[in-house]
Image (spheres, rainbow, N blue to C red):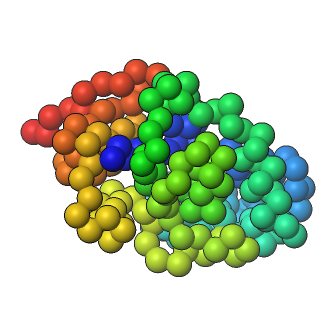
Amino acid sequence: MNVYDWDNTIYRGDSTFGFVLYLYKNYPKTLISIPRTALCGLLYGVRIMPKLAFKQNLYHMFVYVNDMEKAVEDYTSSHLDHVKQWYKDTQKEDDVVISASPEFLISSFCEKTGISSCMASDVNIKTGRYNGLNCHGKEKVRRFYEKYKDGVIESFYSDSLSDTPLAEIAKRAFLVKGDQLLKWPERK
């Protein structure tokens, strides 16, 4: 099987950031959350607030959307053109996506693009609260082996070196830069 990160790998851009902007634009009540997000962003930036706490505070905006399922459906349907052509040309039936973005968002994209297996951060769609750890770094490896006990990753693709733990367990790994697939850098 091949395993992929989602944002800036298969998907051109950061789907979560795009979704936040989409909510601000299409659900004006979410603008109420901007001061909270700005303060938490500052605290995260100066390393007073951990990343998970910052993300939960950002996602708190979900409480201002009456029908989040519809918002997700509308957003993902309108952003399928962000799926990169190189991925469409090489897609296989057993591909797996592992992402730090909210699972409700990534699973909607994956369903629409024909990817049947995805793992991502378990975030409550109504409250924005995490139900567990952010699916990032070593947590991606743990989640992979939890689902695929004896799984073998033929090729792994990601835009970020923070995914080195997954790259290390793959037979081959590629760093994605735009539409270029580069050999994963050797560790020193």
Looking at the image, residue 160 lies above or below residue 149: above
Task: In this rendered view, identify the residue nearer to me: 181 or 100.
Answer: 181
Q: Classify residue 186 as left or right of residue 98.
A: left
Q: Is residue 16 visible?
A: no
Q: Classify residue 22 as left or right of residue 174.
A: right
Picture mark count: 0
Q: In percent of the image, x 62 and y 52: which residue is there?
A: 111
Q: Residue furthest front?
A: 93
| Residue 167 location (% of width, % of height) | 25, 45
| Residue 123 location (% of width, % of height) | 59, 70
Q: Classify residue 55 as left or right of residue 137.
A: right
Q: Quadrant of the C terminus?
A: top left
Looking at the image, residue 96 lies above or below residue 33: above
Q: Residue furthest left?
A: 188
Q: In percent of the image, x 59 and y 57: which residue is there?
A: 107
Q: Is residue 52 visible?
A: yes
Looking at the image, residue 95 lies above or below residue 186: below
Q: In percent of the image, x 26 and y 68: which residue is there?
A: 149
Q: In percent of the image, x 70 and y 75: which residue is there?
A: 127
Residue 172 placement: quadrant:
top left
| Residue 142 location (% of width, % of height) | 30, 67
Looking at the image, residue 28 lies above or below residue 86: below
Task: In this rendered view, identify the residue nearer to me: 110 or 99.
Answer: 110
| Residue 134 location (% of width, % of height) | 45, 66
Task: In this rendered view, identify the residue nearer to me: 101 or 29.
Answer: 101
